[in-house]
Amino acid sequence: MPVNLINNSSTVQLELPKSKASAEVRLFGATVTSWKAAGGSERLFLSSAAALDGSAAIRGGVPIVFPVFGSPKDHADAPKLITKLGKHGFARDHEWAISTHVPRIDEADKVAVTLELNTDSKPEIKAVWPFSTVLRYTVTLAPNTLHCAFSVHYLDSSNGAEMPFHALLHNYLLVPDATKASIQGLNGLYYIDKVKGGEEARVDTDDFTLDAQPIDRVHVGRHKVAPAGEPTRDIKLVYNASLLQDPLGRMGKGVELTRSATIADTVVWNCAEEGNKGIADLEQGGWKKYVCVEPGAVHGFQTLAKGSTWVAEQTLTAW
Ligand code: TA6
């Protein structure tokens, strides 16, 4: 069966036997923890020290950040209503369920599963989030792509207020060597540099390399000088791997990311060697194996009216 429940029903495994593509999605946090494109080579980083027992958000894969990016106190515009939320919100550290509302796709070259989190069913979420909300997440595997569709359904609330939120897909992309990898597609974007205390600057190269320095930047999709209607930018992560780093050339050249216009911002994060020491669930030397490239809606809060739905989608393509 190409869609299986494994590990005591804690994980959904998607498989395409012909191309040898596969993916694993944990019910905890709806976190995709493995994606192997055609040929079977892993494309996501998962720390060997990550907690996989539900005691903490998973360090690696694709955690979902919702409904706040960072802590509410990081945002001067955070509405009072949501100041009790923890860092990066609650989607990534709660158990989701397999949706009974959306049929699973199970075809020769495409398999998908939909997970769901109903905030009303979790008292600890209700205590900090005054909106009845259903989150749905559909992960679709094709031979060379992983498609992730995240939707927010605002059902009800006692005060009828608009729902404020951020959302982001926190992709930990596996790289042969983070100091060699480069990111294309950010050129010209204005960004907020969290390593430099929130300084603002603009990217001036189309081949941005990390160079072993800590990086934590929020690139604003709709940058200040962009003419109205500028298309959403696509990102290419280029491995720049030498034969030494990938002797059999199995990993390919990189990963391309495209997304819906709803998640036009792009966060780039790597903690570098010095930051690695302070992150207990990041394996030693783990910083060199990942680059986080995270499409999101995190610059300013989105608002959703009661009864409405918001959708964000990304496609990762192995090349
Ligand atoms: O998305 C980047 C970021 O917000 C960084 O500031 C860094 O803290 C990272 O996420 C990881 O956060 P976490 O809570 O998972 O340790």
Image (cartoon, helix red, strand yellow):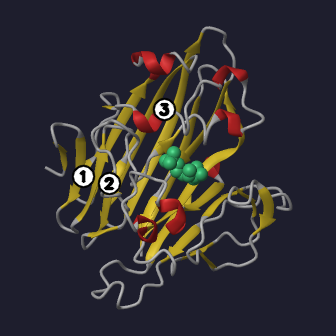
Locate residue 290 relative to residue 28 in the image: left or right. Answer: right
The relative height of residue 239 versus residue 314 in the rendered view (above or below) is below
Q: Amino acid at mark 1?
A: Leu
Q: What's the residue at 33%, 84% (across, down)? A: 246
| Element on which disc 1 rests | strand
Q: CA distance from mark 3 to mark 1?
A: 25 Å
**In contact (CB < 8 Å): disc 3 and disc 2:** no
Q: What's the residue at 53%, 65% (across, down)? A: 274
Camera sees residue 169: no
Percent coordinates x, y for residue 101 in the rendering:
34, 28
**Nearest the camera: 235 or 215?**
215
Q: Which residue was labeled with disc 1? A: 14
Earlier-in-chain disc, 1 versus 2: 1
Q: CA distance from mark 1 to mark 2?
A: 24 Å
Percent coordinates x, y for residue 163 in the rendering:
65, 25
Locate residue 108 relative to residue 137 in the image: left or right. Answer: left
Q: Does the Cβ of the disc 1 residue fall within 8 Å of ligand 1?
A: no
Q: Name the mark nearer the viewer: 1 or 2.
A: 2
Camera sees residue 304: yes
Label 2 neighbourhood size at 10 Å, few (<14), some (14-19), many (20+)? some
Residue 103 shows which numbered tag? none
Label 3 neighbourhood size at 10 Å, few (<14), some (14-19), many (20+)? many
Earlier-in-chain disc, 3 versus 2: 2
**Nearest the camera: 254 or 309?**
254
Q: Amino acid at mark 2?
A: Ala
Q: What's the residue at 37%, 40% (across, down)? A: 30
Q: Does the Cβ of the disc 2 residue fall within 8 Å of ligand 1?
A: no
Q: Which residue was labeled with disc 2? A: 49
Q: What's the residue at 66%, 54% (across, down)? A: 265
| Element on which disc 3 rests | loop
Q: Which residue was labeled with disc 3? A: 90
| Element on which disc 2 rests | loop
